[in-house]
Amino acid sequence: MTSALDGRKQVLGVTLRNDPARDSRFAVVQLPQELCEFPPGTADWCRESLHRHFNTEVQSLEIAAQSLIDFSEAPWELRLDQARQCWDESRHARLIERELIACGGFLGEFPISNYDWSVACAVGTLAGRLAVQNRTVEAGEMDLLRELRSTWGSLGQQSTAQVMDAILADEVQHVRYANQWIRTEGRRNPRAIMEVAAAIAFVRDVTERYTPSPDEKNRAGVAMAELNRDGFALNVEDRRLAGFSDDDLPGLGSASKE
Amino acid sequence: MKPIEQQLGAETPRYEPPTITVMSDEEVLRAFQMTAAQIGAAAQWWSASCSAC
């Protein structure tokens, strides 16, 4: 299924960036059904979701850091924003690790996937990379984090709920600086807008190939259909703060009732 | 000369003349957005909604 190329790998017929290094504690897998996701609210879900969240934050750090290397000619202010993002994401990873240990979990307890890194870092343009990682993935995570804040609060885990809130505040800025740069650069150089379009078309193709069928079961024995991913409500308030206009919002999902 | 549909047979799709849609930068960006649910379906994200909570 996978084959190592020069810094690249092939998964399900698409060429992606090779996985970043992980120490021997971690079992790295490629597909969603190879992970151990449990139904939300269970003790297993608490540990596994924090474990997965930890690796998401580490990947976000790695993507921002790799972009500083891959696009070293980018404007200084943008590079400063990316460097600040590295610092934010490293703090997030530490906070999530603390919550994971408090829940009785430990790093390496569950398999991990480096999907975010592999897809984002396969995009070779700065506008495309920012569109995929910041404007799309991290923007989607703003919707996810708002729900996680509520879920952890409902479970009585106030400390974890507060961590989700703190991370969400930082993510707004990560999405915002990318949205601002893409719009400014697009006015100066319209090619950047086409690079955004090409990058998102690429992610749509990868997404289609990676989406498991509903009757498939993951490594924990849970059918993918039982894991509801349609329930992400649009976090309108933070999306606006992050630079999405009222015209952008209808195409991004339904608003939260929260 | 017969119309192209008749020349090619009844099973051939109707010929559609090409059209051009002019889009602004903002319209292109809007056309290339993805929802959290779309990303989450394949990304290694996790469910957050807890019906039992």
Image (cartoon, coloured by chain):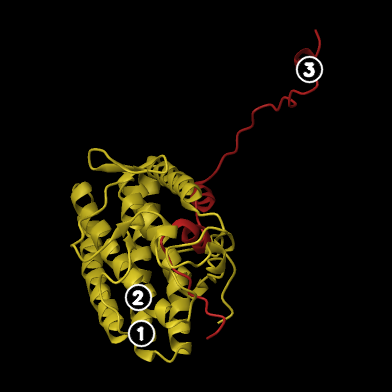
Chain colours: A yellow, B red
The picture places residue A50, in percent across and down from the top left corner, at 35, 75
Is there one chain holding both mark 2 and mark 1? yes
| Mark closer to the chain start, 2 or 1 | 2
Which element is circle 1 on?
helix
Q: Are marks 2 and 1 in contact (CB under 8 Å)?
A: yes
Q: Is residue A87 above or below residue A136?
A: below
Between A15 and B27, the residue placed more toward the observer is: A15
Q: Quadrant of residue B22?
A: top right
Q: Residue at x 22, y 70 (%)?
A: A90
Distance between the alpha carbons at the discs numbered 1 and 3: 66 Å
Q: What label sits on residue A160 in the rendered view? A: 1
Q: Amino acid at mark 1?
A: Thr
The picture places residue A149, in percent across and down from the top left corner, at 43, 81
Q: Which residue is mark 3?
A: B9
Q: Amino acid at mark 3?
A: Gly
Does the image show residue A99? Answer: yes
Q: Nearer the viewer, mark 2 or mark 1?
A: 2
Q: Are marks 3 and 2 in contact (CB under 8 Å)?
A: no
Callout 1: chain: A
Q: Residue at x 41, y 45 (%)?
A: A199
Distance between the alpha carbons at the discs numbered 3 and 2: 60 Å
Query: Around disc 1, counting alpha carbons within 10 Å, would you say few (fewer than 14), some (14 to 19), or many (20 or more)?
Result: many
Tell me the quadrant of the picture where the N terminus of chain A can be found. Answer: top left
Q: Which residue is mark 2?
A: A50
Position of A159 with respect to A153 (left or right) is left
Q: Residue at x 34, y 76 (%)?
A: A167
Which element is circle 2 on?
helix
Callout 2: chain: A
